[in-house]
Each structure stands twice: as C-alpha cells, then as structure tokens.
Amino acid sequence: MSASKTAKTTGKITALDLAQAELSEATKAYFAKCEEKLGLVPNVLKAYAFDEKKLRAFTDMYNDLMLGESGLSKLEREMIAVVVSSINHCYYCLAAHGAAVRQLSGDPSLGEMMVMNFRAADLSPRQTAMLEFAVKLTEEPAKTIEADRAALRKAGFSDRDIWDIASTAAFFNMSNRVAAAIDMRPNDEYHAMAR
C-alpha cells in the first residue's frame, strides 16, 4: 500500500497508527456507559484512547459544553455543532451530530437542513441569531464586534449564553480540524439513527 493510506481504505477509524493505551477502570466504565446509552462507543473516543490524559481532557470539555448547565438547550448546542461542522465539511461531526439533531428534534428533515443549509430550516429568531454568530466565529472570528453580541442579547441570550455559544463553536472548530487531520471516520450506526 502507498504512503497515502486513508482510514477509509484501511478500515480503521483514523489514518494514524496509534495503539490504544491501557485504560483505567474509570475510562472502561465510561465506555461501557456509552455502549449502554448510545449502543456504541463513539469513534472519536476510540481515536483519543491512545492517551488517556488527552481523552479525559476531550471528554471533560465535551461533557461540560454539551451536557452541562446552560441557557442553551441540548438541541441548540447540537445545532451549533452541526452548523460549524457543515462550514468545515467535517464528515465525522456531521454524521454524529446530525444524528443527534435528528434524535433531539424528532425531525429527520431538520437534521438534514442543519447539515446542508440551516437557513432553509424554519428556525426561531433566537436560533437563527445563535447560528449566524457561530458561522461568523467560524469564518471570520477577528471580525466579531459588539454589534454581534448585541444581536444575541436582543434575541434573548444572556452574556453567559453568549459565552456558551462561543465555547461550543470554538470546540467544534478544534474538533473538526483534528478530525480532518487524522481522517477520523464516524461509526456506521450514526447514518441510520433517528431516520
């Protein structure tokens, strides 16, 4: 095989050859909980499992942003993940978080619109403002100005909510770039979820 192997051509979850570290009992329990609740261990977790410290940092930040206390609903946070990932063309996150939008909304077409063009969806003014802000942070972060924050406040977001929108968008921009760099592949199960 040539040096240009990809995860797709090798059947691996990434194009890198990193062996899984010996996992602690806590991490094994976390993986078992994922299997129980989701029916799978997300490949992103398996990809990080070569270094338990990096895996823990990733999961701690993810769980805080996506599942922690926030003025943003879980669906709104997943919408941000999908819109950012759509701009970045992140195959892994579009498959995984597109499935989450379908599941949380109960609307498969909303999940598809979020992936392809969120502006085609029938969103509330609040959601539209939130997603436009996430788009700007992804495409032109240095051009973010007070008027952008004011638009979010006008749409009903608190300053803490603005922090959460920004942090969620930033996290998925980072995740998208790592996934692209290592050719991370989504679990096959995501494609059929909530259809």
Image: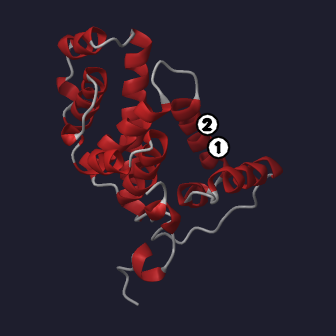
Q: Position of residue 90 (x, y in %)?
A: 34, 55
What type is the residue that disc 2 sits on? Asp
User: Of the residues shown, which amino acid type is indicated by label 1?
Assistant: Arg
Which dot marks residue 60? Answer: 2
In this picture, residue 119 sits left or right of residue 104? left
> Which dot marks residue 81?
none
Residue picked out by circle 1: 56
Name the secondary structure under disc 1.
Answer: helix
The one nearer the camera, 186 or 39, is 39
Q: State which quarter of the image contains the N terminus.
A: bottom left
Q: Position of residue 40 (x, y in %)?
A: 62, 60
Residue 180 in which image quadrant: bottom left
Q: Residue at x 48, y 67 (%)?
A: 14
Question: Is residue 113 left or right of 27 when viewed as pictured?
Answer: left
Along the line of sight, which residue is nearer the eye, 70 or 7? 70
Q: Is residue 158 left or right of residue 135?
A: right
Residue 135: percent from the left, percent from the top?
Answer: 24, 35
Asked if residue 161 lies left or right of residue 43, the reply is left
Q: Nearer the viewer, residue 123 or 12?
A: 123
Q: Is residue 145 above or below residue 181?
A: above
Q: Residue at x 25, y 22 (%)?
A: 125
41 w.r.t. 65: above or below: below
What quarter of the picture does the C terminus occupy?
bottom left
* Nearest the eye: 59 or 118: 118
Q: For mark 2, give the secondary structure.
A: helix
